[in-house]
Image: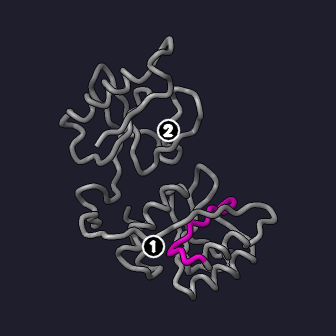
Amino acid sequence: IVLTGSMRPSTSLSADGPFNLYNAVALASSPASAGKGVMVVMNDFILSADDVTKTHTLNTDAFSCPNLGPMGYMRDGKPVFFRESILRHTTNSEFDITNIKELPQVEILYSYAFSSAIGLRAFIDYGVKGIIIAGVGHGNYNREYAKEMERGYSAGVRFVRTSRIIRGGVDKAAEEFDLKHPVARLKSPQKARILLILALTKGSTSSEIQRIFDEY
């Protein structure tokens, strides 16, 4: 599966859409792309879906893989690869949307200086099934958050720790208030939300959720 787009309208002096589309078709039709999973082609670069993110609002090189770098690039209508994802994806996935009748509600909540737990409390009381915590630095949050997360966890809400920072990811760390909550590794808050939604269709234990975040 290959995704592409454009940063400039078709009426601009140097529209990037047509060439991006050409590269996307060339990549999708190349035998070298088999088994590579979902990819994004923008500005000649081949980007993996698990790490790609938009890093600029206007530039034609607005998309990049900040943690792992591009999978390769397009040259004269042919892909040149120098890495691929070893994580589970596409045909190797355990998720089957044909068997999913309803998706659980998962929200994202940011942590910041002097952040209160008002929003966190509201999400829990509303009955959401999962909350992505986009923490400061290495996915950190204050004690008020930690206290409210403990209440939510006891009520069946599942949390996943991520970071607001674009590079580095979040791993288990001894200085955290509570190590029971899964971490998103290199996933951004937005991507972690999608994966947690799917994970909650398979089970709700923290260990099972962490397994899924480790494998995908």
Count of numbered circles in the view:
2
Three-letter amino acid code of the residue under disc 2: Ser
Q: Earlier in the sequence, mark 2 or mark 1?
A: 2
Residue drawn 56% across and 86% down? Answer: 155
Residue drawn 23% across and 48% down? Answer: 35
Nearer to the camera, 86 or 192: 192
Residue drawn 23% across and 57% down? Answer: 91
Q: Label 2's element?
A: strand
Looking at this rendering, what residue extends furthest in the top direction? Answer: 13
In the image, 17: left or right of 132?
left
Q: Residue 64 — which label?
A: 2
The residue identified by callout 1 is 210
Three-letter amino acid code of the residue under disc 1: Gln
- Tell me where residue 79 sits by quadrant: top left
In the image, 116: left or right of 43?
right
Q: Is residue 36 magenta?
A: no
Residue 55, horizontal then vertical, whole percent: 57, 39
Q: Which residues are magenta?
A: 126-138
Residue 1, horizontal then vertical, whole percent: 28, 43
